Amino acid sequence: MAKMISVGPNDVLSLTKPTTKFLCPASSSTHNIEFLRFAIRDDASKRVFFEVGHGVPMVGSMEVDGGNFRSIKYTFSENVLRLPIVSTSLTFKVGEKAVTNFRMIERHYFRNQLIKSYDFSFGFCIPGSINSWEAIYDVPTLNDDIIQKMIANPFQTMSDSFYFVDDELIMHNKACYQYVREDQAVRLGGLS
């Protein structure tokens, strides 16, 4: 078996298109970090576009791609693409090992072109803890032409999410997105 090359934050920040494979094996996640709840909402109206978690009724649409828990397909209302400010909340549990300098870098692409990049630092997490993290951030403005292309081309919008502890890559997840018209989102249930 070939040895994985060490990947650091600067490596993923220099990516200009989505990765074609996972940059670390699932076995790299030795800190037993478990994501318990995640939500995305419009910061101004507090309207929830997506929410998933233990004991929480799911809002929005998500499917695990091909049975691989590290690759997910999302369906969102087109309105998500027009939000100026997004609020996200994340609840996660840490295993019996302390997590120092926990950091997430998320890169979003449409047709192999970088459109958004986020870099979040969670800092230190004590062993066995449940942690909540809220972020409010400006979303880069997309012109109407690119929004229409993203709607017309389902699952060609992709993201790579990289999780680091002390600058060592411990998790890499991939996602692809479908954006649907508002009336279709309402019919799908809960996506509006």
Image: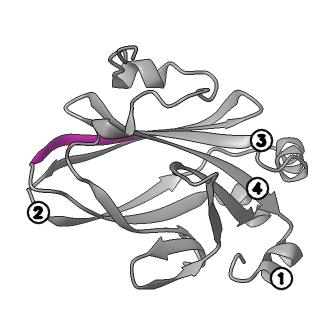
The residue that disc 1 covers is 187
Earlier residue among tags 1 and 2:
2
Residue type at numbered disc 4: Gln
Q: Which portion, as a residue range, is magenta?
A: 98-104
For disc 3, the neighbor class at 10 Å (few under 14, some 14 to 19, many from 20) is: some
What element does badge 3 sit on?
loop
Q: Please name the residue shown 81% across and 44% down the image.
A: 143
What element does badge 2 sit on?
loop
Q: Quadrant of the N terminus?
A: top left
| Side of 19 where 83 appears, left or right | right
Residue 156 disc label: 3
For disc 4, the neighbor class at 10 Å (few under 14, some 14 to 19, many from 20) is: many
For disc 2, the neighbor class at 10 Å (few under 14, some 14 to 19, many from 20) is: some
Task: Residue 118: give x, y in percent of width and height.
Answer: 47, 41
Q: Main secondary structure of the magenta part?
A: strand
Label 2 vs label 4, nearer the camera: 2
Figure check: 38 above or below 138: below
Circles 3 and 2 in contact, beta carbons < 8 Å:
no
Q: Please name the residue shown 89% across and 43% down the image.
A: 145
CA–CA distance between discs 3 and 1? Answer: 22 Å
